[in-house]
Image: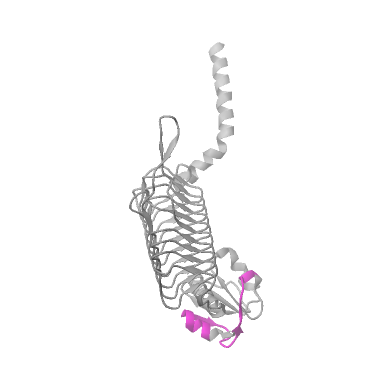
Amino acid sequence: MEFTAQQIAGFIDGKIEGNLDVTVNALAKIEEGRKGSISFLANPKYNHYLYSTESSIVIINEDFVLESDVSTTLIRVKDAYTAFAKVLNAYQKATSKVKAGISSLAFVHSSANIGKDVYIGEFAFIGANASIGNNSSIYPLSYIGENVKIGNDCLIHPAVKILDDCLVGNQCTFHSGVVIGSDGFGFAPQQDSDFKKVAQVGNVIIEDRVELGANTTIDRATMGSTILRRGVKLDNLCQIAHNVEVGENTVMAAQSGIAGSTKVGKNCMFGGQVAINGHIEIANGVKLAAKSGVAGTIKKEDVVQMGVPSFDHKEYVHSYIYFKKLPSLVKRIEELEKELQNLRNS
């Protein structure tokens, strides 16, 4: 399929600089662009590629200032990254084959409620009293337990496990290996140093437009619910423990983990491998740099923290100057102590 610059500009509400009629039929990174492809530029680190790329069209921010002439056609928009994401989504829909129907190799319990235009792939399991909403897709080898409710327009990739009694909203996407509703990590210490398992009888509630990366796990609550509010986005290999609540539109990069009963506010952003202690609260809009460790409640909204234990990122950067100098500082102190001792002995 080919599209002109004019058609794309209309789709993303952009302004064209260059050939209105140039056509593209492929997507490419700006540094790998070739004739007939469309790219985007949002990160200043890649600015220099704009002047050498062979892409026929490049989407850029409307305030980008050219340093020299370019050979490509430009489409200026308010946010190049968001605009290109819109193009990517449209391309995926146009090129993807729509799956439909229920495979004869799938198991669907007779009491399950299956909506309209649902796809259920080979060796998927749909348990008793489960409900699958309209236009949702359950890919092969996935397990949907008893009493699970899945909303409309959900995409459940292969080998996802959603265990009994969990609730999923509309327009959710779960990537391969996701496990929702596994037992929370609850063990009571005994006098003989053994541990007795505490039954986990709650569930998981996932609201609308949540996306979970591959092999992410969301534990069921001990009692009540573990909750992911609408718009939450988790990367691969994240761990959400029992009775955690994650606020609206919070995002976490890979390998982040949250211990039990912690409440995370809305619009938070966590880098990779962030670790958050249990039974604390994180205010709205908090940003945590990669590998931060949060030991206690963060009450102030919209702060940026880093380090272990985490504290204000500006203070951390200043402190790090001294962290790096610790060996030489220790050596100087030892030398001064020796000199002081010599003076005392003289």
In the rendered structure, the answer to whether residue 261 lies left or right of residue 288 reads: left
Quadrant location of residue 250? bottom left
Residue 1: x and y, percent?
59, 84
Give the residues in magenta. 7-31
Residue 159: x and y, percent?
53, 62
Colour mapping: one colour
Is residue 323 shown above or below 115? Answer: above
Quadrant location of residue 232? bottom left
Of residues 133 and 38, which is closer to you in this image?
Answer: 133
Q: Which residue is pictured at 52% across the width and 38% down the height? A: 322
In the rendered structure, the answer to whether residue 54 lies left or right of residue 140 reads: right
Q: Which residue is pictured at 44% across the width and 45% down the height? A: 185
Is residue 284 shown above or below 138? Answer: above
Q: Is residue 156 magenta?
A: no
Residue 288: x and y, percent?
45, 51
**Quarter that holds the C terminus:** top right
Q: Is residue 22 magenta?
A: yes
Residue 311: x and y, percent?
43, 44
Badge count: 0
In the rendered structure, the answer to whether residue 47 lies left or right of residue 295 reads: right
Going by the picture, which residue comes out furthest to the front?
110
Of residues 321 and 145, which is closer to you in this image?
Answer: 145
Going by the picture, which residue comes out furthest to the bottom?
21
In the rendered structure, the answer to whether residue 146 lies left or right of residue 80 reads: left
Is residue 72 shown above or below 275? Answer: below
Of residues 8 and 246, which is closer to you in this image?
Answer: 246
